[in-house]
Amino acid sequence: MDRHDVYAHHTGEDDWEDIPYRDSLWTDDGRATGVVSSSDDFYNIIQYGDILETVGDAVDRHEDVEPRGRVSISPTAHKMSANVEFDGATVYASQDDPIDLGLQVQSGHSGFHGLKYDVGAERQVCSNGMTAFISELGFDQTHGEPFQPGLAYNAVDAVIESPAEIEHRLAQAQNRELRNQDEALLVLMDTGIDRYLENPVPDLLNAMHDEVEDTESPTLWETYNTATRALTHYTQDVPDYELAQGFEQASQLLETGGNEVPEPDRLGRSAVYSRSRDLIEQGDSEPYWPDEENALRELMEEHEIQA
């Protein structure tokens, strides 16, 4: 990735003039990536290769861990996503539910993307991906500062050295329940992951059938697994660099943003309130399923929400 000057075209005079406060970003094979400030105080180019090499160096310090994974880059190279699995680092949601840990790396050059490292994982029993479900294990920087290699070392160390914390988080999520399947479905739709699915409600219901033991009391863990199953197995032709955002949206079922498991009642009430405004009060939305309005009114009554 490198900088090039930006010019403005004066159509009346058919002339070009240099814009001193803007640079364009281009790859070495000629792809336009973004338009950014020409000042290093406001925008520093972070090369994808430097990020990945630093992550590799950070993993090499852990002798019992072997990295493997994949990198996805958008056609214009303005987004990059890397899923790095740490072979040798495993936690357990239960005795029969092993989860391989790893690191999710996201970076970009669209003018506002920065660099993010988040805990990543994959459940062995179903290959469901997991990302950003513990905020304390995440690190990020903006393009306003030069590349900070130390963040990659911190991120790798944090993930590999935190199995007890991760297992505690998953255990907490298994002990917190939503009211019923209808509320769980509304919470899932409220995360915004439906935009990655061709048939959101059927896909989520199918995933729920595989992941939820009791539809009258789905746990946050089961509801989260419903989201990750749908994103992992039911998405069509969605590249990793886009899907990474979907997994991050799903993580709000396990993470408040303050390194805590959310309260199911708060999640449910927020989703029910938001949906009631769209479907009942404003009437500018179609029902997700035939009897949704009745189900929604029952949940509104339980949450003491007035239409």
Image (spheres, helix red, strand yellow):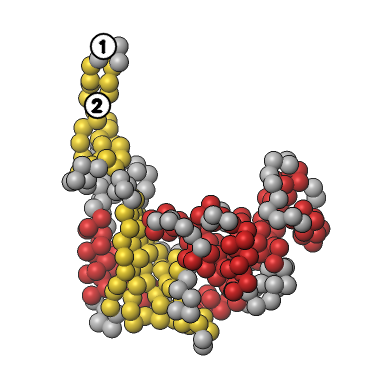
Residue located 27% across and 30% down the image: 21
Q: Is residue 304 visible?
A: no
The reply, left or right, for residue 226 in relation to residue 14 is right
Secondary structure category for the residue under label 2: strand
Residue at 36%, 76% (x, y): give it.
160
- The answer to whether residue 212 shows anywhere in this view is yes
Q: Residue 261: percent from the left, percent from the top?
A: 57, 68
Looking at the picture, tell me which residue is in the foreground, 71 or 137. 71
- Whether 130 is drawn above or below 114: the answer is below
Task: Point out the frontmost of discs 2 and 1.
Answer: 1
Outermost residue toward the left in this view: 28
On the image, the x and y values in percent for residue 16 come to 23, 20
At 49% from the left and 66% from the top, the residue drawn is 233
Camera-side residue of 159 and 128: 128
Q: Could you tell me residue 102's position as x and y percent?
A: 37, 72
Q: Which of disc 1 and disc 2 is earlier in sequence?
A: 2
Residue type at mark 1: give it.
Answer: Glu
Q: Which residue is mark 2?
A: 7
For mark 1, what is the residue? 13
